[in-house]
């Protein structure tokens, strides 16, 4: 509330008007990593860490934006939207994509702030993009629905920012539902909500405090490796469109001996989709122990076969494994840094925190920060306080 009051007061002082307030959350993903751009399944949820935006209309075809936490300002004309290679691109990209899609509006003011730790892999960029799209849709009655808006966010990131990310982050942030995970089919965008019945168990994020510069280039390389695998298999099976259509038998028969690296990448994706489907069944049966084992399997695959982990993330998972109150742990998101996600018994939270903080420091000389998260609704208006 303190933060919202600050945003409102700053907005009133700067723009002499009352703002519309929007909350746009970050996300976690329980299992199903690097599957979204392979037309597979993911199991994300929106969390109680968010970007908060105060917005209002202008009439001079300009946008004036203040990044409250960075103490930075951007001002520009709607007619000239060029990438700046700064935080402003997440906003400009959404505006540019809206205009390209034929939606027009006369300018806006925005001040934003947030509680999503930066660079921790919790999708602060998707949250910001969704927040801006949602705000403009509300302010100017553009008539877009949530699916339109999250697709705009993805295009902003792909085309304007230049990161070839999949749909998961925007989808989770926009479509999240309190106390539910989203089972999303990234091929059809069909989705179902599954209530997370984990009484007495917390979702704990351990921040490795590592942010590798590799992430964008290696992310794009993994995409290309998966596409290469698909192209190779299409010579034998022309009906295949993505790794979603591929089985382990196909990979074993045609790729294992000839293309060992591509084989490992593709095998990880095929196995991760299978783990997700098994994971959904385990959650339905309230078998958190089985779900936890699948999380460890996911981490192993991401680390050894997909090679998107890093020593610090591996260490965090290895330490978590030794604690009897932990059901499962794995790296989360794109990789090369950011957070691990852990399912931890509530009564073990203190001893888990102590163990992982001490051991991580001893093994890496770095500090880890723990966040216990709650599952919240997706992007939306904050009603009058
Ligand atoms: C990043 C991307 C997502 C997804 C994950 C890996 O978070 O933005 O689209 O590919 O990595 O699962």
Image (tube, rainbow, N blue to C red):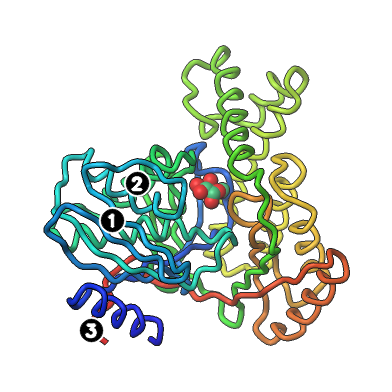
Q: Quadrant of residue 15?
A: bottom left
As displayed, is residue 243 above or below residue 214?
A: above
- Residue 206 rendering spot, x and y as whole percentages: 67, 69
- Report if the CB atoms under discs 1 and 2 are less than 8 Å apart: no
- Residue 294 appears left or right of 69: right
Badge 3 element: loop
Q: Which mark is residue 72?
A: none
Where's residue 270, x and y in %? 61, 38
Disc 2, SS? helix
Residue 281 in view = no
Instruction: Name the residue located 72 percent from the left edge and 42 percent from the top edge.
Output: 307
Residue sitting farthest toward the top: 235
Name the residue nearer the viewer: 374 or 194. 374
Mark nearer the viewer, 2 or 3: 2
The numbered disc on residue 384 is 3
Q: Which residue is mark 1?
A: 133
2 or 3: tag closer to the N-terminus: 2
Residue where numbered disc 2 is placed:
93
- Check mark 3 vs ligand 1: CB closer than 8 Å? yes or no: no
Is residue 306 found left or right of 380 in the rendered image? right
The x and y percentages for residue 357 are 77, 76
The residue carrying mark 1 has its beta carbon less than 8 Å from ligand 1? no
Q: Is residue 198 visible?
A: yes
Camera-side residue: 355 or 51?
Answer: 51
Residue visible at 56% across and 24% down in the picture: 230
């Amino acid at each position: 509330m303190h933060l919202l009051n600050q945003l409102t007061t700053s907005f009133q002082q700067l723009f002499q008007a009352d703002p519309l307030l929007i909350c746009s959350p970050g996300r976690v993903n329980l299992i199903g990593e690097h599957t979204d751009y392979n037309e597979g399944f993911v199991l994300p949820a929106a969390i109680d860490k968010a970007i908060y935006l105060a917005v209002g209309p202008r009439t001079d075809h300009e946008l004036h934006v203040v990044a409250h936490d960075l103490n930075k300002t951007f001002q520009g004309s709607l007619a000239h939207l060029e990438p700046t290679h700064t935080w402003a691109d997440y906003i400009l990209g959404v505006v540019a994509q809206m205009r390209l899609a034929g939606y027009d509006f006369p300018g806006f003011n925005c001040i934003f702030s947030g509680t999503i730790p930066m660079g921790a892999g919790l999708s602060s960029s998707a949250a910001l993009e969704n927040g801006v799209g949602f705000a403009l849709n509300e302010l100017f009655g553009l008539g877009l629905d949530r699916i339109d808006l999250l697709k705009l966010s993805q295009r902003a990131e792909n085309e304007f920012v230049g990161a070839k990310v999949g749909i998961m982050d925007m989808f989770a942030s926009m479509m999240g539902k309190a106390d539910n995970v989203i089972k999303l089919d990234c091929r059809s965008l069909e989705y179902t909500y599954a209530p997370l019945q984990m009484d007495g168990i917390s979702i704990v994020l351990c921040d490795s405090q590592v942010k590798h510069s590799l992430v964008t280039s290696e992310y794009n390389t993994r995409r290309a490796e998966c596409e290469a695998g698909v192209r190779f298999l299409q010579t034998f099976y022309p009906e295949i469109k993505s790794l979603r259509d591929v089985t382990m038998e196909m990979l074993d028969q045609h790729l294992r001996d000839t293309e060992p690296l591509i084989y490992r990448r593709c095998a990880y994706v095929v196995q991760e989709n299978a783990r997700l489907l098994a994971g959904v069944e385990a959650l339905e049966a309230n078998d958190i122990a089985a779900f936890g084992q699948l999380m460890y399997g996911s981490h192993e695959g991401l680390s050894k076969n997909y090679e998107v982990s890093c020593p610090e993330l591996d260490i965090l998972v290895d330490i978590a494994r030794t604690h009897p109150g932990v059901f499962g742990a794995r790296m989360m998101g794109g990789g090369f840094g950011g957070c691990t996600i852990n399912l931890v018994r509530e009564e073990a939270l203190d001893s888990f925190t102590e163990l992982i903080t001490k051991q991580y420091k001893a093994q890496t000389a770095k500090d880890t920060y723990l966040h216990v998260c709650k599952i919240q609704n997706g992007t939306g208006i904050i009603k009058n306080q």
